Amino acid sequence: AQKVTQAQTEISVVEKEDVTLDCVYETRDTTYYLFWYKQPPSGELVFLIRRNSFDEQNEISGRYSWNFQKSTSSFNFTITASQVVDSAVYFCALSAAGGTSYGKLTFGQGTILTVHP
Amino acid sequence: EAGVTQFPSHSVIEKGQTVTLRCDPISGHDNLYWYRRVMGKEIKFLLHFVKESKQDESGMPNNRFLAERTGGTYSTLKVQPAELEDSGVYFCASSTLAAETQYFGPGTRLLVL
């Protein structure tokens, strides 16, 4: 069975601070995908990134960066110089890359990030 | 390009009534998924369509829930009869057959009183 744990329920920071959202996962699949989604106050889930299990390169996109470490089953997300617009609920998710349950996303509980001006 | 759309955005019904939620995927997306987030819990998978066929319905909670995708385009999720514990946000997502990334709709907020 798959499991995703986001231990941080809520994080509060002041604008311009860096913040890291933790994500730890469990899976028996040898190939899988990891995702981060953002849910702003408007409610929709916005796709941020997908990472394949065979690609452990870290990724940077503007102020966002992701650190994937297979050895610790972690896929952490860092926002540099946070802004008020980053306030949202962030979800980490996992899916198998094949099999009958391919595509089925297993989500973490979500981390509520509040960035204060 | 239009994103995934869901209707209605909100629904308030009484226990025992029937509600039908609709999802229109991104045009050309053959994969369609339904998820649900009950208050305070994580988002959970309900089922997965590939075109008009149910690929995986392992997450459907019970037989009060019926999902259809006639013609492989839009999908409906009917709850009949609704119970209090069905309250939550129902999300729909879609992806192409080859892609692994799902794009989500805004969700339908269902409240059963």
Image: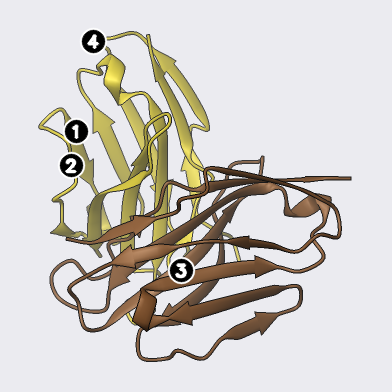
Chain colours: A brown, B yellow
Residue B54 image position (x, y, % from top left): 16, 57
Residue A68 image position (x, y, % from top left): 47, 79
Look at mark 4 in the image and give the residue it sits on: B16
Give the residue displayed 79% in from the left and 52% down from the top: A85
A75 and A39: which is toward the camera = A75
- Marking on residue A35: 3
Give the residue displayed 54% in from the left and 48% down from the top: A111
Amino acid type, mark 1: Phe
Look at mark 2 in the image and give the residue it sits on: B60
Contact between marks 3 and 4 (CB within 8 A): the answer is: no
Say few, some or many: other residues with alpha carbon within 10 Å of mark 3 (under 14 / 14 to 19 / 20 or more): many
Contact between marks 4 and 1 (CB within 8 A): the answer is: no
**From mark 3 to mark 4, how far is it between C-alphas?**
37 Å
Which mark is in front, 3 or 1? 3
Label 4 residue SS: loop
Amino acid type, mark 3: Phe
Q: Pinpoint the chain carrying mark 1.
A: B
Contact between marks 2 and 1 (CB within 8 A): the answer is: yes
Q: Is residue A88 left or right of residue B52?
A: right
